[in-house]
Every structure is written in C-alpha cells, then in structure tokens.
Amino acid sequence: MFDTLAARLGQAVNSLRGRGRLSEDNIADTLRQVRMALLEADVAVPVVKAFIDAARARAIGTEVTRSLTPGQAFVRIIHEELTRVMGEPGRGLNLRAQPPVVILLAGLQGAGKTTTAAKLARLLIEQHRKRTLLASTDIYRPAAMTQLARLAGQVGADYFEAPAGTRPVDIAVAAVAHARSHVHDVVIIDTAGRLHVDQEMMAEVQAIDRAVCSTEKLFVVDSMAGQDAVNAARAFDTSLALTGVILTKADGDARGGAALSVRHVTGKPILFLGVGEKIDALEVFHPERVASRILGMGDVLSLVEQVQAGVDQDQTRRLAEKLAKGRGFDFTDLREQLGQLKQMGGIAALADKLPAQALPPGALAQVDDRSIGRQIGIIDSMTPAERRRPGIIDGSRRRRIAAGAGVQVQEVNRLLKQHLQMGKVMKKMKGGGLARMLRGLAGRNPGGQGPR
C-alpha cells in the first residue's frame, strides 16, 4: 500500500548521504520532499504539518555518530515520527463485558464491512474460543444478508436470520436477544453503508447503537479512500463515539494516507489491517512495523508470525525427520511446500515484508505467483514413482508431464532444476532454520532500527 510513499521518502533521504551533520540548511530540501511525498499520499494537511514540525525539531543539530550516516539518522527520526503519528499498537477487541459482547461495524459502502465481520468472527472463534453470532442490518444492498450468512458458514460462526421486512433496529435487538438465549459470547452487527455520509445513515446507526449498547463501535474504512476516509471517520466519530478503526484493502495499490491520518484526526486507535480478500487476511495493527515497511526496512516480525501460522507444523516435522534420516527431498515434499506457500499468499506477499536490501533490485517485479499453480499442476501430472524418484524422469516422461499439465517442456525442466536446488536448501533449513533466518533479518535493517 505504501510503495509510492516509500519510493519518494527514499529519494528524499538519499539527498542527505555524505553529510557530516544535520543542519537546518541541509535538511530543508529533504523536509520539503518529505512534505510533498506525504501530501501526494493523501495524508491530511494538519497531520503533515505536525509531522514535519516534529521531524525538523528533532533533526536539526543532531550529531551523526560514527556508525550512522546522516541519511540513516534521518531515517531513524522519520521512522519514530511515523510510528508516533499512527498511535499505539492495536489492542485487539474489548471483550470485558457481560456476554453477549456487542461489536458494531459502521462505515461507507464498499469499505469491506461484511467481509471484515466474518474475519473478526474467525479471529474470535479460533484465537479466543468465543461462540460468535453474526447479524446483518443491511436491508438495502441486494444479497448483503446472503453474503454474510455464507461467510458465517465458512468461519464456523452462527448467523441470525431475521424475517423479511424487519427494520434494521429491530433486527439488531432481536439478534442480541437470540445471542443471550442461545449463550453466545459475542454478537457482531454489520450495518448498512452509503456512498456518502448523510443524516439518514447516521440516524439509523445511532439508533442501532442505542438499542443494543455496543461495547465496540468500529469504523471500517477503505485504505484507498484517501481524504474521504478521514472526513468520514470524523463524521462517524461525532455520531457514534467510535472505539476503534479497521483499515481494509491495505494490500492494494493505495497511497496510504488514511493509515497516517485517521488516528491523528479522530484520536481513535487503529486495531486491525485487512490485507486481502481471504477470510484469514486480517492483521493486528503494529505502527512500528508499518513505519518500517514504509521506509523499506521490511516487516520481518510479521513475516515470521505469518510463516509460523501458515506452516503445517506436523507436516514440517515429518519432513525434517525424513531429511535427518538421509532420505531425499522428493516431489511429494515439494508439492506440500508449494501448497503451504500458496496458502500464505504466495511469494509476493511474503517478500513484501522483507527489507529492501534483502532482495536484488527489481526482484519483486519479476515475481509471478501464478507459477506456483503451474508447478503444482506439473507435479500432479507425474506418476507416484516419478514423484518419489525424480531421477527416472527422462525426455519422453518430461514431454508427457508437460502435456498433462498444459505447459511447455522448458517449464518442466526448470522445475526439475529448482527441485534439485531446493533439496540442498531444505537440508540447511531442517529443524526450524527458516524461522531462525527470518529472525536474523529482523535484527538487520537500515539505521539500526526496526522490530526489537
């Protein structure tokens, strides 16, 4: 989401390289570039002004130590100020209330409220072991209730279905009563959105909130909405007294200004980031990690957590034991690894969290996650014997496998070569070597800063 902003800030910092001291003269142009980068990223003007003033006050006269170049010292200052602007880490959901705890989602149309409701339900069920009920009061959008009911089934939550023609407020009240009588721990109420802020919408959301006494009143906002996101957040906070914010579509091609503005403008904490359409694509908000990604430092701690959550531990343990016994890394093993990689979002999603210095220039531009599907197709076209003993795959077998997978023979040859290379790497990675490597990267990023 921050690609453009990261590139502009990188150019600004590069202008300070080689300086022996940060003074008002030699940072003036750099701060001007930073200001323009923030404004182009749709960061609110008051936020930009406060940010630049704080950065200037800290940067002027700062002595550069032997281990730091001025550019790195300035990166540290910008990193810390970005972290401060975005507020404290996401605290998670407030569940300290008499059950059923009511979570109310509000926001503009198209922000992703319905999908976010299901993501929150999944989090509550899997991480907090809470019996969760989903309810939709959106009687205006076609198939809105059907969509939430389908998503509830996917995440293992219950869904409250109201009779046709029921008013939104009555749906919410009935859902809470149903949750109380059926011993649910949490009720998540998805409200209707509009294309813009209007009195009718605000009155309806206020009435629902008063009727059910929400513990959490969360504003769901599209990261790509720019200044509209900030204006809408201010309006909803005035009407509802929000308790937190969820930024959706943070994996998209957005300018990122909403993430830097909403917290400052509303004073409400950002709790979660929606980072994809999949039902598990919801991350706790960590301002320090987001600031690191903006400045090209990567987000290795989140990457480690993503790998640990996405990897099948039993499968990995079996592979490690197999390698420890000296048995080879075959194509059945490779297919399992590719499947886990695909489940974690693909190579691009993982590489995006690595520090810029950890990847060759232009490496991400060459990543094509569709190749994972083609490679799985090639392996599926092999016989069990070919998967166990790749050495028997001769020219005629390669042509048959390529035809079965619908690819060129060259792709089969590439996969065979990659398999040999990966077999060597896997021997080094057994016993948790991948996680140790990623933790090592967490301690090495520009300016000596980053996740501690």
Image (cartoon, rainbow, N blue to C red):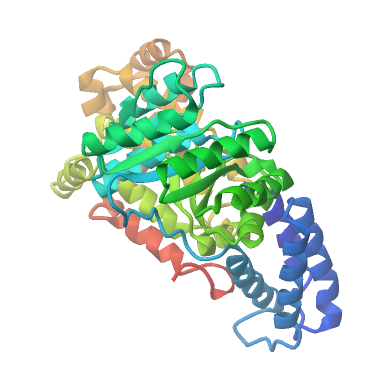
Q: Position of residue 264 (x, y in %)?
A: 64, 62
Q: Is residue 12 above or below residue 285?
A: below
- In the foreground, 428 or 110: 110
- Would residue 41 be seen by someone viewing this image from the given angle? yes
Horizontal relation, residue 232 to residue 124: left or right: right
Residue at image location 49% in from the left, 17% down from the top: 143
Q: Could you say where residue 20 lies in the image, as x and y percent from the top left? A: 75, 85
Depth check: give the residue in front, 214 or 316: 214
Can residue 277 be seen at all in this image of the molecule? no
Q: Who is closer to the viewer here, 306 or 279?
A: 279
Residue 83 placement (x, y as % from top left): 58, 67
Residue 162 occupies which quadrant of the picture? top left
**Residue drawn at (73%, 51%), measured in percent from left and top?**
41
> Where does the C terminus fall, quadrant-wise?
bottom left
Q: Is residue 417 above or below residue 445?
A: above
Q: Position of residue 419 (x, y in %)?
A: 35, 35
Q: How many marks?
A: 0
* Residue 231 drawn above or below residue 451: above
Quarter holding residue 224: top right
In the picture as drawn, the residue positioned furthest to the left comes out as 325
Residue at screen point 55% across, 54% down: 241
Q: Is residue 179 above or below residue 413?
A: below
Residue drawn at x 63%, y 52% as measured from the top left: 238
Apparent side of residue 120 relative to residue 333 in the rendered image (left or right): right
